């Protein structure tokens, strides 16, 4: 079978299983099988697949039709300007989260060197992107999951920023190391009951530890803010990603913990997505 026919068949199969973007996903998975980019696939659509390639492609399409996210099948995801290794123990980096990177680069554009901390590094997409852009920044990162720490280290090596990052497998509750100019976090913030309504791709495959924000969606955020109020220096900043409907409650928690609000930033869809605050 040639590349084009295999992709068309796969795309139909995915559509039958209610997978959106069935054609794009099929092309990406074909790229993974052939270890070539999508351009090659499109330019060589009449090339015949050998049996090993076709069987591998069919296996990937089966995974995808069972809702396994493409990033977990290919083992990688693009975020900011870089490719990150991912597996099903870490949250797949989301485009909305690039807002934190964008805001850090804007607000610290004239700063040569700062010491910053990320709570809940996951794949490392945020902290490593910042370190990549700011050559003298020093980062510390922690995560409750040892698998996240392991993967973040791999990505730090891949991006060659390993000499400017220190990583800790720790619950934020027990982390008391240092004082920082800046703390950043994309905390778990989904309400427990809302978890049931998430897309199948997410609920079946992504780590609960990265999503579950407790009954009101704020239990981790609350913890992260309380702890940050001890970890951020006076006049230092805290950048938090939030859900679209959490702005007012999160502002209240920040103020109760000695922060004042600088601004909230909206994502491309116009939803409140990031709150920037300063420690009094
Ligand atoms: C929403 S994910 C964010 C991951 C990554 N920073 C990103 O934006 O893709 C939240 C991360 O926080 C970690 N986490 C959850 N509760 C934690 C806690 N109490 N202490 C430390 N890390 C925690 C999870 O393991 C997960 O990796």
Image: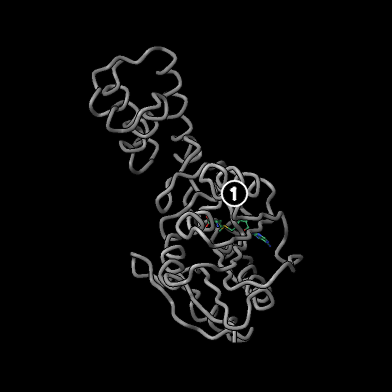
> On the picture, is 261 further left or further right than 109?
right
Q: Residue furthest right?
A: 174
Q: Position of residue 252 (x, y in %)?
A: 56, 84
**Which residue: 59% across, 60% down?**
139
Does residue 190 appear anywhere in the picture?
no
State whether residue 251 is above or below residue 1: below
> On the picture, is 58 further left or further right than 89?
left
State whether residue 146 is above or below residue 193: above
**Which residue: 57% across, 43% down?**
157
**Which residue: 56% across, 68% down?**
114
Q: Quadrant of the C terminus?
A: bottom right
Q: Position of residue 54 (x, y in %)?
A: 40, 18
196, 178: nearer the viewer: 178
Q: Position of residue 257 (x, y in %)?
A: 64, 83
The residue where tag 1 is placed is 162
Within-10-Å neighbours for mark 1: few <14, some 14–19, many 20+: some
> On the picture, is 242 further left or further right than 37?
right
Quadrant hosting residue 120: bottom right
Does residue 78 appear anywhere in the picture?
yes
């Amino acid at each position: 079978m040639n590349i084009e026919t295999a992709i068309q068949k796969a795309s139909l199969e995915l559509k039958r299983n209610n997978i959106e973007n069935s054609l794009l996903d099929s092309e990406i998975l074909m790229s993974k099988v052939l270890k070539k980019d999508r351009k090659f696939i499109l330019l060589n659509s009449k090339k015949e697949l050998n049996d090993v390639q076709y069987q591998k492609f069919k296996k990937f399409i089966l995974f995808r039709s069972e809702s396994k996210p493409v990033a977990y099948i290919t083992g990688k995801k693009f975020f900011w300007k870089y490719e990150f290794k991912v597996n099903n123990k870490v949250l797949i980096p989301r485009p909305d989260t690039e807002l934190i990177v964008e805001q850090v680069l804007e607000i610290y554009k004239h700063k040569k060197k700062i010491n910053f901390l990320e709570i809940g590094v996951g794949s490392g997409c945020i902290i490593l992107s910042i370190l990549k852009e700011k050559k003298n920044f020093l980062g510390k990162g922690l995560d409750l999951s040892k698998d996240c720490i392991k993967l973040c280290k791999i990505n730090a090596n891949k991006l060659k920023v390993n000499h400017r990052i220190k990583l800790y497998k720790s619950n934020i509750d027990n982390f008391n190391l240092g004082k920082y100019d800046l703390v950043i976090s994309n905390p778990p913030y989904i309400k427990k009951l809302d978890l049931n309504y998430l897309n199948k791709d997410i609920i079946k495959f992504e780590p609960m530890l990265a999503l579950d924000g407790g009954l009101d969606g704020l239990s981790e955020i609350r913890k992260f803010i309380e702890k940050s109020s001890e970890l951020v220096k006076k006049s230092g900043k805290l950048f938090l990603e939030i859900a679209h409907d959490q702005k007012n409650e999160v502002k209240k928690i920040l103020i109760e913990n000695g922060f004042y609000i600088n601004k909230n930033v909206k994502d491309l869809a116009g939803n409140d997505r990031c709150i920037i605050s300063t420690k009094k």
